[in-house]
Amino acid sequence: MNDDSHSSSDSSSNSSLTRQQARQIAANGLWSNNPALVQLLGLCPLLAVSGTIVNGLGLGLATLAVMLGANGCASMIRGHIRPEIRLPAFVMIIAALVTCTELAMAAMAYELYQVLGIFLPLIVTNCAILARVEAFASRQPLAPSLLDALMNGLGFTLVLIVIGALREALGQGTLFDGMELLLGSGAADWVIQLPGERHMLFMALPPGAFLITGLLIAGKNAIDDHIARRRPASQPPSEQRRVRVTGTIH
Amino acid sequence: MSTLERLQRWLGLGGSCAPGIRPDTRKARTRDLGIQRAPLPPQVSLALNDNSHKPWAETLLEVNDGDWVRAGQRIARPVGHLALPMHAPISGRVNLTGAAAITSTREHASDAPGIVIVAEGCQQILTMRPLAADHASPEQIFERIAEAGIAGMGGAGFPAALKARAAHRAGIDTLVINAAECEPYITADDALLRHDAERVVSGALILARATGATRIVAGIEDDKPEAAEALSAALATSSLPADVVIIPTRYPSGGERQLIDRLLARRMTPQQLPVDAGVLCHNPATLAAIHDAVIRGLPAITRIVTLAGQALSAPGNVEARVGTPAATLLADAGLDTSRLAKLIDGGPLMGHQRSLASAATTPTTHCLIAATEQELPSPPPPSPCIRCNDCVPACPAGLAPQQLWWHTRVEDDARAKAHGLLACIECGACDYVCPSHLPLAASFSDAKRRLRVADAERARADQARARFDARKERMQREHDEREARRQARKAALRRPAPKTPADDHAPTSSAPADLRSLRIAQAAAKAALRKAEKALERAAQQQQPSEVLADLESQQSTAREHLEAANAQLDAARQEAPTS
Amino acid sequence: MSYLHQTAPIASSARVMRSVSLACLPGIAAQTWYFGAGVITNVLTGILCCCLVEALMLAARSRPLRPTLADGSAMLTGILLGAALPAGTSVWLILIGAVAAIAVAKHLYGGLGHNIFNPAMVGYAMLLVSFPVPMSLWPDATGFGAGDVQNLWQGWLGQLDASTLDAVSGATPLDALRQPAGASVIGDANLSSPWAIISLAWLAGGLVLLAQRLIDWRLPLAMLSTMAVLAALLNQVSGTGSVAFHLFNGATIMGAFFIITDPVSAPGHRRARWVFGAAIGVLVMLIRGYGGYPDAIAFAVLLMNLSAPLLDQLCSGTHRSATDAPRGNS
């Protein structure tokens, strides 16, 4: 989790973003340090509201917005805030942004706001946001922080969408049901009815969400293993530790 | 056992009832054949104890390569406190060069130095002076037992003299003769009791008298009626009250603690020994050896070994010299090497597998099994533990092997210890019943070994830490003393020295050093006075309360006095040593 | 090192599993007699699916197939799962149940001997939660040949629609517990009713297992006696069914002798087993009386499986011989 902050720690005064850095941040946020599949943060909303695609998308976008704002603010004030009070300060920023997002969603997508219920305000406690702020944005200049927030938020949202799709398909037999709650009435006919009448209620309930998340994590690990096996073994390990093999310690 | 206890046991709310297993005893082939005397072997192989791993059992060789030794002569001296002297089983030449392949008494073959004696010359055994058992003191008896090198012949090999001395010190009341012989195949004690019970009883009486036991109890299984009768007959004429208790045949009824619990209803924690319960327990062969040592002066160089197994055409019990190669013994018993699949030293449940070429009779070998493949087939590979709990009623120590298995499997030895691992006697009954064929006893003995090693390391670390602490303390003390001396010197210089006549005539060999230090003292006193004056000025300017001003004034006057004293000392010193 | 091993009849865990599977036959036969050939297809499909999933999981875990498949544990899970499901369940349902039982409850926890939960009950519970409607539709107990072959084949393929299913199915007596005013249906159980005969057949199998000392008698005794006491008490208080009603309906006897006695998921210590059996009895009565599912064996067993390690720990404590003082002089 700390590898990305170490890799660009020398650029604290230089606020431009190199392509290499950007690629690294994107890869981390979307895959190798994905908040839901690797960091395993924010699992409560993940499991509770990923019942359909639209629910997952809605919460994911809200989380993304809050992440962007929180990372940006934290990065901008990082030189001016005392270390002893940084955590309460960050939580205050996140809380303010969550309130804004909640009000925005209530104004623009009221039914979805009602469906998401208490999980919108609970974004404040979503550890994924505080983790990125604390580990990355409070040490990095603005541009990398915003990119990191974007990528992490996207990664979280993508996982939410995948789980939502699977649960919706298995538990309800539909896909893209209810998209008009978020994207306006034109999206009402995006619904796809899947064949088959028997629906697995288990998948629509939280235990099914646990199972599917576990399977996704297993799948990601399997893919990682496969890639690692195919990569040539000539690359030395990234961390070299010198082992004392001679001499005695006086 | 009260009715309530019985009901409790029946309902499964209390302790275990009749733990153990009942395997087929397979003793029929060897039990009725009496004891043959094995022919003298052409050479014997003995192993010294592995010094590096067991310093407490260290013995020192007393003969050199090429020496001729007489049977019964001592060839190794005990050094460690648990060591035993070693005697030559046959007369012959000592050959130390080709002895690398001898296996030691423990399962893991060590590269312990081995001794080979090639038979040569007069085979008369060197004996010690026979003692009159009735008149000898206990200490003489114990010394004789120690000299004869008698170890517990039931398999453990603990020095009998140590046990006897401990029993004498602790004050025991009962001597138990452990004639249970519960392991399948083994009939050595059975044969000994049938044909020579008087020797056993004589040894028991000697030991009982020496350690102060007032009663003898013998435990024997019910599949040995003739031996029980012979033992009863021999004990009938003993001077001490004696009982022969017949116990049901079950493995392992011969475990020391289990037998004592069964015969006398006395229990011990795993850390305690039988002597803490007032009991001394011995195998009949050991008692017979004690008789031989005391009455006939013979060292422990022979023992009875059961030769069994389907690969032998003439099995039986033989009295063999210690160190006889297994190949020789088994060849005399009609070994068919083409059918031999396993050679086991010991019983089938607690013994160890050996190779025919290197195995020899050790002082604790009581059985050699030459087994065919059908007789003792290799078990199928272990499958996972299904927690069937069949092992729990089989365990004689009342443990739950299944629970211990889950902990020792991942080497969580501390938790295994908390569940009673140290009470395990490694009898192998749990191995026998396990439907998944798990190697339980081996895993437990590995765990116990790891615990022992960890304890030894911890003791070493504790000792190192204690030494380090003591050293630190000593250095601190020395530092403090030096500091105190320095302070004392400084204080002596500051204080005005009393003007005694002796002082004036004191030698001024260190005059320059004194002058220098006096000058330093004067400068310091001047500085102190200045500081006190300044402080007083400042306080006066700040209009401090009068107590503060009074304090500072007294400090100032004290400083002035010090300065005057320092000036006086300096002047006096200058006068004495004009060349300053 | 022990070189001597038991050669008695019960010498391996494979034989244990096979003996238990054989002891299930009377119960299955009785169920077939009353509910038709659907029971047999259930059991056979269950065995097939469980073995298939086990083979796939072993391959995925890179373990050798032959020794583990041969130990019969997957077969036993398939039999129990098939017997617990309503007759004529479709193959897809059984396959999903097998995946839940073998892949999730057994292999994801480490394989045989490592599973915390009873695999058959996990499969059953997953199916019950996922497909509540098909799982509660038992066919009428009209004897062998209930439902013609055409219906059976279509049912197996999962092609029967809901209305046809309703027409050939009836509720179990335990369903009546869920109705608020079902007092007329509940009464003293008639020992010649279909469910009672089925329970007696399972009991026969269970007694065979007891005689062969393959299961611990404490578990069924604790569970059934607790249920009997509670049923008697609750019957006096609120008329929720007599003792015989509760003991001889549904999967009570089957659960008592075949499900809770699974050695891997039950505690090992003797005293812990008493508590385990009794607690399952209490939970079954509670869920039947006040919960939403008619036959509560699966959930009660799963809940108590969670606490089995804790029970073991509480009941065994420190080893007895470490605290006993020596008796006699010293």
Image (cartoon, coloured by chain):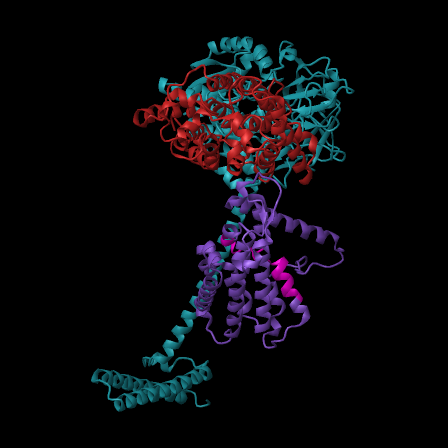
Chain colours: A purple, B cyan, C red
Q: Looking at the picture, does residue B342 appear above or below residue A138?
A: above
Q: Looking at the picture, does residue A98 appear above or below residue B215?
A: below
Place residue B128 in its image quadrant: top right
**Spot occupied by residue C210 in the image (x, y as percentages of width and height):** 50, 18
Q: Is residue A28 magenta?
A: yes
Count every numbered label the image shows and give the total: 0
* Front residue of this view, candidates A221 and A112: A112
Q: Is residue A212 magenta?
A: no
| Residue most extreme to the right | B338
Residue drawn at (63%, 14%) of the image: B26
* Front residue of this view, candidates B7 and A90: A90
**Spot occupied by residue B251 in the image (x, y as percentages of width and height):** 55, 20
Using residue B555 as the reference point, say whether residue A160 is left or right of it: right
* Front residue of this view, candidates B511 and B238: B238
* Front residue of this view, candidates B286 and C318: C318
Camera sees residue B63: yes
Camera sees residue B144: no
Q: Looking at the picture, does residue C51 appear above or below residue B452?
A: above
Quick one: quadrant of the N terminus of chain B?
top left
> Which stretch is magenta?
A23-45
Q: Looking at the picture, does residue A188 appear above or below residue C220?
A: below
Place residue B516 in its image quadrant: bottom left
